Image: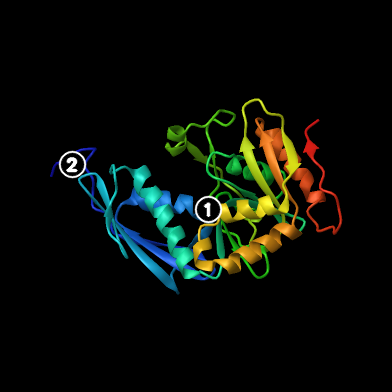
Amino acid sequence: MSAAPPDARTATVPRTVYIEFEEHQVAVRSDAHEVLSGLEGMYSAMVVPEGTHVVRTLVVSSHGGAYRITGDTAFQIADGSLTDVLRCLRFSVIQAMMQARPDLLWFHAGAAAADGRAILLLGPRGRGKSTLIVGLCARGWTYLSDDVIPLNPTSSRAVPFPLTPARREFPGQEMPADWLRSPNKVDVPLSSGGLCRHPVPVGALVFPRYRMGAPARLSPCPAAEAAAELLQHCWNFAEYGKAALRRLCDLAARVPAYHLSFSNGDLATELLALLRLRVAPSPGGKRDSVGAR
């Protein structure tokens, strides 16, 4: 009996990966090893051995090199690439968790914690959130997320959503829209001891922005402006309406908020690390600008 050609693909047995957030699981089933392996890398800190409360099941199939996802909805992946299917699965898992926990406010934000309080970095992609969060964790902070943060609106506590952090391969450059859409991020592994496991009170809000040649500088953000920024980056604000507005205005009034402009990620991270001395509420305290020396 002749051996099969080296490039021949053998059939694989389908298996299921369970991703858990707050005791809710999304199940992803596939016989495409590369898809499940990529998903497990993306959600490495959130994968559990079994599902006890599955809120959504997704099935990924591959035909002729093109992928298809079925489940609550069915759709063909645009260009048939592995990058595309993983991007769709990432979004689908987040969407399922948002629907399972509508009591939380969900933000496009990163967060890290020190001394029992979390700093939230809010903003669209390309603002340097992942680079700064990874930098803080390298300095001993604990990791909540680099891209998705659920917030308990009653307690103002940030809930960990520990996607595997990923930073761009070429930080320190201007980021055009087409470059932002390309798969140019590299996963950054974190030790289990570096993960934040429980909700943490928010101690500071930071709105970062990369600017070519700009010195690293933190400047105060007025409470009204901070509230507007929070609303802008809240994904499920429409479901909450006026209740969310009240909660976020209250948070912005109680918690120090800053704009961060920078071109050097290391210097900007050093400035953020200094905030661990400032995040505890201090009624009547003055919020000073902070610049790298």
Q: Earlier in the sequence, mark 2 or mark 1?
A: 2
The x, y position of residue 232, in whole percent, is: 56, 52
- Nearest the eye: 194 or 73: 73
- Residue at the left extreme of this rendering: 1
Which mark identifies residue 163?
1
The x, y position of residue 249, in whole percent, is: 67, 61
Amino acid carrying mark 2 in the image: Ala
Amino acid carrying mark 1 in the image: Leu
- Asked where in the image residue 16 lies, by quadrant, the reply is bottom left
Colouring scheme, one of rainbow, by chain, secondary structure, one colour: rainbow
Q: Residue at x 81, y 51 (%)?
A: 278
- Nearest the eye: 29 or 293: 293
SS label for mark 1: loop
Which residue matches tag 2?
3
- Quadrant holding the C terminus: top right
How far, Cα to Cα, is label 2 from label 1?
42 Å
Give the answer, above or below, for where 250 lies relative to 257: below
Q: Residue at x 54, y 56 (%)?
A: 45
